[in-house]
Image (cartoon, helix red, strand yellow):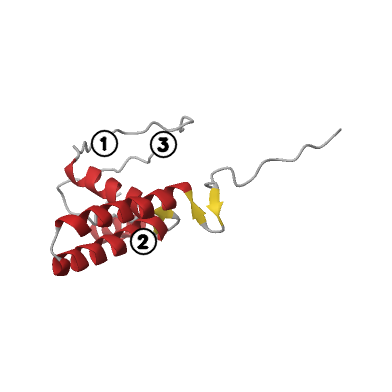
Amino acid sequence: MEQYPIPQFIEQESRIAFFISFRQFFYLVGAGVLCFFLYFTLPRIIFYIASAVIAVASVILAFGTINGTPILNVILGSIGFSFGGKNYTWSKKESPYPFKPIQRTQIKKIDSGPVLKAQNSQLKRTKTLIDLKTK
């Protein structure tokens, strides 16, 4: 039987150059375009502060991951969880196979009388009969 190669690493993003994917490229280009427009609209000191914040944020969005998940997905997931409705429902799950019921022993109730009962032995009865001399 002929063996065919199984495709692996299907979920990898395609790379434009060396280590930059399309998504990372557009984050960085978008930050550059935003900084370009801010250069002409804001005063110099405010532009430097804003462009530094935008540059750091775009680099974190482009290259940052948490447990292999992009930072943007983590941020959007946490916002969706925080503001989304939550439904806490518990439902009893039936077992996949039936259980056999266990027969439990019946517990006998103790009468209200004394717990220990004195038993009359045959020897005591005979002694009493001899003492009384009756037969």
Q: Is residue 16 visible?
A: yes
**Residue that extends furthest to the front in the rendered view of this protein:** 40
122 or 32: nearer the viewer: 32
**Mark 3 = which residue?**
103
Please state which of the two labelled residues, at mark 2 or mark 3, is closer to the viewer. Answer: 2
Mark 2 to mark 1 CA distance (whole Å): 43 Å
> At 46% across and 29% down in the image, what residue appears?
98
Q: Amino acid at mark 3?
A: Gln
| Mark found first going from the N terminus, 2 or 1 | 2
**Mark 2 = which residue?**
59
Q: Amino acid at mark 1?
A: Trp
Label 3 Cα neighbours within 10 Å, binned few <14 / some 14-19 / many ≥20? few
Mark 1 to mark 3 CA distance (whole Å): 30 Å
Total label count?
A: 3
Residue 31, position as x, y percentages in the image: 31, 54
91 or 49: nearer the viewer: 49
Helix, strand or loop under label 1:
loop
Vertical placement of 48 versus 24: above or below?
A: below
| Mark found first going from the N terminus, 2 or 3 | 2
Helix, strand or loop under label 3:
loop
> At 22% across and 59% down in the image, what residue appears?
39
Mark 2 to mark 3 CA distance (whole Å): 68 Å
Do residues under tags 2 and 3 come within 8 Å of each other at their CB atoms?
no
Give left or right: position of 26 versus 131: right
Q: Is residue 66 visible?
A: no
Position of the N terminus by quadrant: top right
**Mark 1 = which residue?**
90
Figure quadrant of residue 64 = bottom left
Vertical placement of 39 versus 90: above or below?
A: below
